[in-house]
Each structure stands twice: as C-alpha cells, then as structure tokens.
Amino acid sequence: MQLANQPARGRQRRSRKERNPSLGRAIRYLGRYPKLTIAAAAALFIATAAQLAVPQLIQNIIDTIVTNTVNKTILDLPTAFQTMAAERLGLDLANLQLDLDNAPRALLIAGLTVVVFAIARGLFTFAQTYMSQALSQNIAFELRNDLFAKIQRLSFSYHDKNRTGQLMIRATDDVERLRMFLGQGLLMALQSFILLTGTLTILFMTNARLTLVILPTLPIALFLFMGFGRIVMPLFREVQQRLAGVNTILQENLAGLQVVKAFASQPREQARFGDSIDYLLEQRIRISRIFSILFPFIFLIANLGQAAILYFGGRQIIEGTLTLGEWQKFSLYLIYVFIPMGQLGMIISFMAQASASAERIFEILDAKNEVEDKPGAIELDGVNGRVQFEDVSFRYFNSGDPVLQNISFTAEPGQTIALLGSTGSGKSTIINLIPRFYDVSDGRITIDNHDIRDVTIDSLRNKIGIVLQETTLFSGDIRDNIAFGRPDASEDEIIAAARAAAAHDFIMEFPEGYDTPVGERGSTLSGGQKQRIAIARALLMDPYILILDDSTSSVDLNTEYEIQKALNKLMEGRTSFVIAQRISTVLNADQILVLDKGKIVDSGVHEELMETSAIYAEIYHSQLAEDVELS
C-alpha cells in the first residue's frame, strides 16, 4: 500500500508546487527585512565591481611594461639608429623618453590602485557576508516562530497522523537548509549573475571576435547544470525524509529509554537505528556520486575554453591585433566566466536542498486545521457551566466506524459527571470533545446554550481546567509548572492550589521547595507527585469546568483519599467531568454515565445504577472483591 500510494503523493506534491512554489514563498520572506536585503545586495554589487576592475588594471600594468621595454630598447640604440627606428615605428623620441621616465610612477599608481580595489572588495565582501548571515538568521527565526505557532494551533487529528520526529526535523534541519540557501546560495547566484554579465560585457567591448570563441561553452555548461538540478532535487527531498526517520527513532528511544533498558532491547534498537543511518548514508552517497560526475565535466568545458583562447588569442597577438596586456586581461576575465559556472554547482546543491526543505516547511504552514475559530466567533464569557451533548457522534479523521454514537446528556452548573466503562468505550473521547481538541462529526456540544464551535478556542479553553491521564510536566521548577496556565499568579495562589491538590507537604520536603527542578518530563518526581502538581496546575486556573481524566490513577489509596477530599471541596460550584477506574472515587457523582462501545448504555446515580445497570453492578462488585483481596 505504501508503494502504491507514492505516485499519487508525488503527483499531489507536484501539483501543490505548481500552484504555490515553496522556494519562491521562502524568498519572499526577504521582504520582511528590506533594509538588510538592499544593503547586502549593494555590498555584493560593489565588491563584484571591484573584482571586475582588477584585470583592466593588470592590462594597463602589462602594456606599460611591454611598451616601455620597447622604448628603452630603442633609446639604448646609437643615435642614428634611434631616429631610424622611431621613424619606421612612427614614434617620437621625445615622447618615448617621457613615457620611459613616467613608467615607474605609472606602475606605482596602478599597483596601489589594485591594492585599493582589493581592500574595497575585502571590506564590502565582509559587509555582504555579515549582513546576509544576519538576514538569513532573522528569516530562520521567523520561520521557526511561524512553524511553532502553527504546530501549537494544529488540531490533535493532525498530530495523530504525523510523528514528532518528522515535525522536529522540519523546524530544525529543514529551516537550517533553507537559511543556508537564503544566506549564501541566493547571494552567490546574484554574484554569479553580476560577474558573468559584467565579464561578458567587458569582453565584448575588448575583443568581440575572441569572446565569440568561448560563448558556445556557456549553454553546454548551463544545460548540464539544469539536467543535474532536475535529478538531484528529488534526491535531496528523499534525504530530508530519511533524516526525519532517523530523528524519529532517536526521539522515541530517548523518550522510552527506561522501557528499552527494562526489556534489554538495546541491541535491537541499536540495529534499527543503524539501519536508518545506513539508509540515509546510501542516499547521501548517491547524491555525492552525481556531483562527482558533474564537476569533471565542468572542468573539462573550462579547459576547452581556455585552450581555445590560447590558440585564437595567440594568433591575434602574432597578427598584431591583440596586445599582450589585452590577452592577459582576457585570460583573467575568462576565469570570471568559469567561476560562476563552478559556483553554479554549489548554487544548485543549495537550491535543491532548500527547495525540498521549503516544500516540507510550507506543508506544515499550509496544513488545514480541522479545529479552528470560525469567522465571527465570539468570546465565551460569564460562564455558568451548563454543558449539553446533543446527539453527538464522532469518527477519527471523519472515516471508519464511529467512536461515539448518538451521545446525549446534560450537565447542569455545579454538577459532577462521572464517566465509567471499559477501555475503548469512549470516555476519553467525550472529554476531548469539550475543549475542542477534536470537533464532533455529528450533533453539537453547547456550554450555556452556546455551540462551542461558535466561540473562540482560547476563550473556551480558558474556562476549562484539565488533568489528563498522562501527566506532562515541563522543564523548570515546581512553581513554574503549577503556574503554567497563569504565569502571573502570586505565590499565595500557587501555594493554595498546591495545598488543595495535597501537593504542598511533599513539595516542602524538598530542600529547594517550590524552586525544585522537576527534570525532563518530571523525571525527578514520582508518578503520584507529578499527578498532584498537574492537579494544582489545573486548579490554579480557577476553571468553570473541570475535567479529570483518571487523575488519581498514579497515587496510592491514602494519597487518593487526600486528593479526593480536596477535589470534592473544589468541585463545588464547578461543572466537573471525572473519568475514574475506581468506582469509589465517583460514588457521590450527580450523574454517572456508563459507556460501552461508544454509547451511553446506562445513566443515573450510584443507587439507581446498582439496581438498573448490570454493567455498573459488575464493575462495582469486581472492584469490591479486589479491594477485599488487597485488604
């Protein structure tokens, strides 16, 4: 199936590229920094102009030397022969002596001028390099910010279909390759164009006949580069995809290192990583092989052009239609013709990599967000907390069998709604729909009679406090993690939230208290400690609606009892949705919804369900038996 889908994906990529050229869009980011862009281009133009002036100065030096060598030879002859030689050559002896006397000064001025132009070229090249690097770094900053903001806003369904490693490589390596092209490749292309155009103009003005000798080599070289460019661009795209695969394996292993070691799977994972590296290396070698074929051809063409200039230029010198200085200037300018051709290989390499990376970057930036604010969405304000599900059904990716089917219930303000059921019954899906992590496939969800799709996502989520089953903490200290949703919270508010979550006592047992670093993903804390900090983080938001997804699953019975007491008090006045594996934590719920295979099969309070729901009674008695065995 994967191979069968590749041509379709290729056609889709080509079609998308034709409609919206990604590299062109990236280049337009230069417009965000017009002063830097213009300054870098101006510095490049001046540095290239200084480079173009040097061969003309060298011609003047050589012609001065050759002319004055002839003058000295004539003036060293006996007087009678001087007059005879000067008359035959149509020269004036007084002018010959004057030129000879001025020759040292002319050579000194020409030499100093060469030095001045070299210094100017060096200074402006430095300025161009500095500004182009500053420009490219600013654009990389813009792209990474845009990517991060987009990834943050994309719906969960997008992240369900895309691996973390793929997204990370686009925000790092792909942006860097695009930056390299904008900071070096693009200006190198501009420099090559200016150098080639300026050189050919000067050559035509100097000697049109000799210039026509080398012109046929240019389209040959250009044809070669265009052909190689079409070959290597898809190869570089494949490199980025394989690099993303390597990064994915690395990210998974670092995140799951404890599991890898627990199952003694290091050799297998190392072999898997080695295979992915070999797969990447194979593609890089393929590209290197292609470029190793390209450059000998370019050098061959350059040498053929040089040989033609030696032959035809030599004949013109013999015929007296070309001076030695002009020939030397022509030879130097000929190097300037082939320098851009040599640079073209690097430019194509930069462009091929940047084109592949730009396509992958804008793939994310252009990704359609399945959950976003609709036009004219209103702010959700003054919430009472009445939540209503009206005939809600849901399918992941809007296809396949429904995960939820025709769910309808009403949570009145301040009520606690408990969700019970086996794994896969749809409990987590229900709570994921309330903050619009996903949008319903059918039906609607309302808060205070507002369809949640009609209000802004931020205003909706600001009214909801969530503790997910899988606790996620961020790098920093405990205080930062509790105040994650409210960075401006006071110390007293943070401590109050921690006390309510039964977290304050264990936090104060640490030597650094609330300043204790939590380690990567909370690695320095136990599961129960992480869970209580996550609860404190949600409570600090003082939400109107509280969602607890099995929030006491990682704590022992004593800690669960402490947390539950605090939560019972804090859930007063808030509409709360609780998923719990233990019935004991939801006995006092205002409504208990029993789910099975995506449907509500029973609902009511504990006493009612014990009499009317076989599933609920079975869960209750099985857990009661377990508790007896444990006791």
Image (cartoon, rainbow, N blue to C red):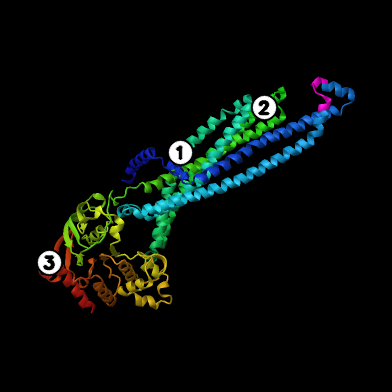
Marks 1 and 2, the one that precedes in the sequence: 1
Residue neighbourhood size for the residue with mark 1, other residues' Cα within 10 Å, grouped as few (<14), some (14–19), many (≥20): some
Residue furthest left as drawn: 611
Image position, residue 136 (x, y; %): 50, 48
* Relative horizontal placement of residue 40, taking residue 544 as reference (left or right): right
Secondary structure mainly formed by the magenta segment:
helix
**Kind of residue at disc 1:** Ile
Which residue position holds label 3?
A: 613
Above or below, comparing residue 370 to residue 434 in the picture = above
Which SS class for mark 3?
loop
* Mark 3 closeness class: few <14, some 14–19, many ≥20 residues within 10 Å: some
Q: Which residue is drawn at 46% across and 41% down?
A: 232
Spatial separation of the CA atoms under disc 1 and disc 2:
38 Å
Tag 2 residue: 313
Where residue 544 sits, quadrant-wise, is bottom left
Q: Distance between the residues labelled 3 and 2?
A: 103 Å
Disc tally is 3
> Looking at this view, is 446 or 153 the one in front?
446
Contact (Cβ within 8 Å) of mark 3 with mark 2: no
The residue stretch that appears in magenta: 87-95
Mark 1–mark 2 CB contact (< 8 Å) = no
Tell me which corner region of the image, top left, top right, bottom left or bottom right, holds residue 323.
top right
Between disc 3 and disc 1, whose residue precedes?
Answer: 1
Identify the residue under disc 1. Answer: 231
Where's residue 590, x and y in %? 17, 68
